[in-house]
Image: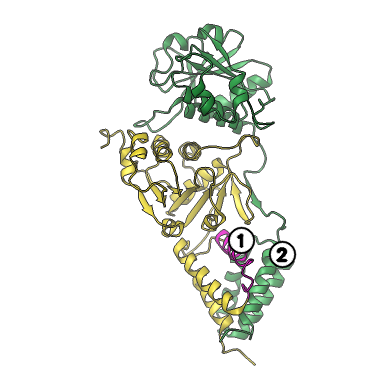
Chain colours: A green, B yellow
Amino acid sequence: MGRANKSDIPEQPGPAVILVRPQLGENIGMAVRAMLNCGLGELRLVAPRDGWPSPAAQRAASGADSVLDAARVFDTVAEAVADLTRVVATTARHRELTQRVVGPRRAAAELRQWIAAGERCGVMFGAERTGLRNDDLVYADTVLSIPLNPYFASLNIAQAVLLVAYEWSQAGVSGPSETLVTNAARPATKAELANLFEHLERELDDSGFLRVPEKRPDMVRNIRALLQRALPTDQEVSTFHGIISYLVSKKRKP
Amino acid sequence: MGRANKSDIPEQPGPAVILVRPQLGENIGMAVRAMLNCGLGELRLVAPRDGWPSPAAQRAASGADSVLDAARVFDTVAEAVADLTRVVATTARHRELTQRVVGPRRAAAELRQWIAAGERCGVMFGAERTGLRNDDLVYADTVLSIPLNPYFASLNIAQAVLLVAYEWSQAGVSGPSETLVTNAARPATKAELANLFEHLERELDDSGFLRVPEKRPDMVRNIRALLQRALPTDQEVSTFHGIISYLVSKKRKP
């Protein structure tokens, strides 16, 4: 199983994902894909209803086989969390227990800190429909509640795993939040832009477009502002020179 | 259909979710659930493969029927985005076009700002496997790329919708950190831009600029991407029509 390198378990340490009494193998497989999407590689299963291994989980996990194959199965939550120092329980419900409740973003930041400090962490998710029981929650030191539309909050397991794993992955992202994909091109210099403006304005003068002297400065400024705002590449500046030249050329079809 | 109050379409304005050539009804239904989980209520479909309405979508959307029932279906991306002023395209791929690329968190913050300023916004998602084509991307002014495990980045549509909608829901409304000062002008609609592109391309065809058939599609896409990126106002679009007309006019100085 496994596709060369693509489905290898991430080497970066992360929290274990602990699915408690999961029912549908398909959901387990989808959860595993979501884990690997977000760089998480350690899966623990507590008493999966349909036994283990699960052909349905294998089908749904297509491409993420390595994570599935390395999953460990436990009979009880107590055994599944025995080696961990921090356990976060994901639940949409209000519970009777007095526990810290955090959102996914806060939980992700905390997990990063704990793991950086050498702690071993896990995030528990409950079964479809029933979720985690109070008897499960007592193994958790932190409750994670995903704030959603209060009138329509139900997520399936794989979606809940995706959101928590996504927040985990984003908590480790730094760098610019916006980039301009320019491929082989580079951003045009302001000199190249000035040259383009002169070319365009010369032709617009010739054509009569800028013939009203009192309006000319505003027109020119507006056109320049528009093109500046687009942050053209050097190639796009060349293209625009070509467009202007062709539009004004005499060799037009009859 | 619908379950009392639970599946009502959110009243809070949000971006439209635009699914382009979706294939499996089940994915449409799951995407609709993810939308409603996160408070989004406007769905637009472009050429759903299996027709519309879709029994499979209805089954999978269980509980979110109101959003599904209110979905609008279009033949083309152009029609689906015609009334919008901002279109964000979600894609995992590297593309040839020069476009702004942002992550989901930044995109959500920007969408909040734009919508608070009265703009009409949409987020496009491509078909299963194939995603959005370059011909779709030219209708977008912003590209949204979800940073995931580079060795395992594939998400299904419903998961991509969930992550984008989740970031939308998490982005609280706060003061804008960046705005586009448009003064008396308003952002051009995509229909106005499409009209401008047609005018320009018609004249470029006449002039011979686009005479090499195999290069034409790329040239046209690059020009469109540049002008989309500038987010022209309605006045600037008018100005550009004037520029084109004057450049090609016969009444030129000797």
Could you tell me how far apart the alpha carbons at marks 2 and 1 are, in whole angstroms? 12 Å
Q: Residue at x 27, y 36 (%)?
A: B2
Please name whichever residue, B57 or B173, is drawn nearer the observer in this view of the structure.
B57
Disc 2 element = helix
Q: Residue at x 31, y 36 (%)?
A: B7
Q: Which mark is residue A190?
A: 2
Residue segment shown in magenta: B209-229
Is residue B220 in the magenta section? Answer: yes
Q: Residue at x 39, y 13 (%)?
A: A96
Question: Can residue A11 be seen from the camera position used here?
Answer: yes
Q: Can you give x and y, in whole percent of width and height, for residue A240 in the image? A: 65, 70
Check the image and report above or below for A1 versus B194.
above
Amino acid at the residue labelled 2: Lys
Q: Can you give x and y, in whole percent of width and height, for residue B195 in the image? A: 47, 69
Q: Residue at x 52, y 25 (%)?
A: A29
The picture quadrant where one finds residue B29 is top left
Q: Can you give x and y, in whole percent of width and height, for residue B178 in the image? A: 55, 51
Q: For the residues tagged 2 and 1, is the chain the same?
A: yes
Q: Which residue corresponds to mark 1?
A: A230
Q: Can you give x and y, in whole percent of width and height, for residue B103 in the image? A: 58, 43
Check the image and report above or below for A160 versus A210.
above
The picture quadrant where one finds residue B240 is bottom right
**Which of the two labelled residues, at mark 2 and mark 1, occupies the earlier sequence position?**
2
Badges 2 and 1: C-beta atoms under 8 Å apart?
no
Question: Can residue A28 be seen from the camera position used here?
Answer: no
